[in-house]
Structure formats: C-alpha cells, structure tokens
Amino acid sequence: MPHWVARQLHQDVHLAEGDRYAWELTGVVVGRGPDCEPLLVSVRPFARLTDQVVDVAARLYRQAFVVGDDGT
C-alpha cells in the first residue's frame, strides 16, 4: 500500500463510523474540494475496504509519518 493511500485512509477513517464504511471509487476528477479532496463525476464503487485494510493503513501511517506533524 503506497504511503499516500495509507495517509488518506487513516485521515478519513473517522467518516466510516456506525453503519458507514470506507469505499474505493472510480470516476472522473472535475475539481478539488475545500480540503483538496478530488471532486468526482461518473462515480462507480470499486471496492469496499475491510477493517483489516484500515488497520494496515493505520500501522503504515504510524510507521511512515510523524503523527501530529503538519508537514511544514
């Protein structure tokens, strides 16, 4: 798993609480949102991410990045 994928998944995992879960989507990028997230059209679900994938992303994130560092 590339580090940037682990970072994005770890940063947004809080959105998958309760009956919601993480998805990987395909689509056409038409812009960027206020948090620089891609805005898509023609969206299609590609894969539902399991808890195990989320756990791997969290471990990789902690190994690859200084947690709490804003990158500046």
Image (cartoon, helix red, strand yellow):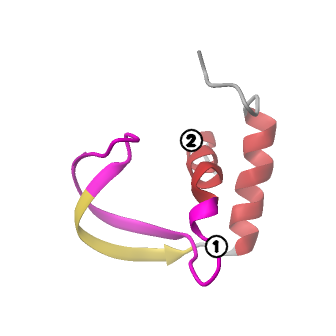
* Cα separation between marks 1 and 2: 22 Å
Q: Residue furthest top?
A: 72
Residue 7 higher or lower than 66, as above or below: below
For label 2, the residue is 4
Q: Earlier in the sequence, mark 1 or mark 2?
A: 2
Of the pair 54 and 11, the residue shown nearer to us: 11
Disc number at residue 17?
1
Q: Residue at x 64, y 80 (%)?
A: 18
**Quadrant of residue 27 within the rendered picture:** bottom left
Q: Position of residue 51 (x, y in %)?
A: 72, 73
Q: Residue at x 38, y 47 (%)?
A: 37
Q: Position of residue 4 (x, y in %)?
A: 56, 41
Q: In this figure, what is the number of numbered marks?
A: 2
Q: Is residue 10 left or right of residue 29?
A: right
Q: Residue furthest bottom?
A: 19
Residue 38 higher or lower than 26, as above or below: above
Q: Amino acid at mark 1?
A: Glu
Circle 1 — which element? loop
Q: Residue at x 76, y 28 (%)?
A: 66
Q: Position of residue 40 (x, y in %)?
A: 26, 59
Circle 2 — which element? helix
Residue 20 higher or lower than 7, as above or below: below
Packing grade of label 1 (10 A; few <14, some 14-19, many >=20) is few
Q: Amino acid at mark 2?
A: Trp
Q: Is residue 55 left or right of residue 7?
A: right
Q: Nearer the viewer, mark 1 or mark 2?
A: 1
Disc number at residue 56?
none
Image: magenta residue range: 14-39
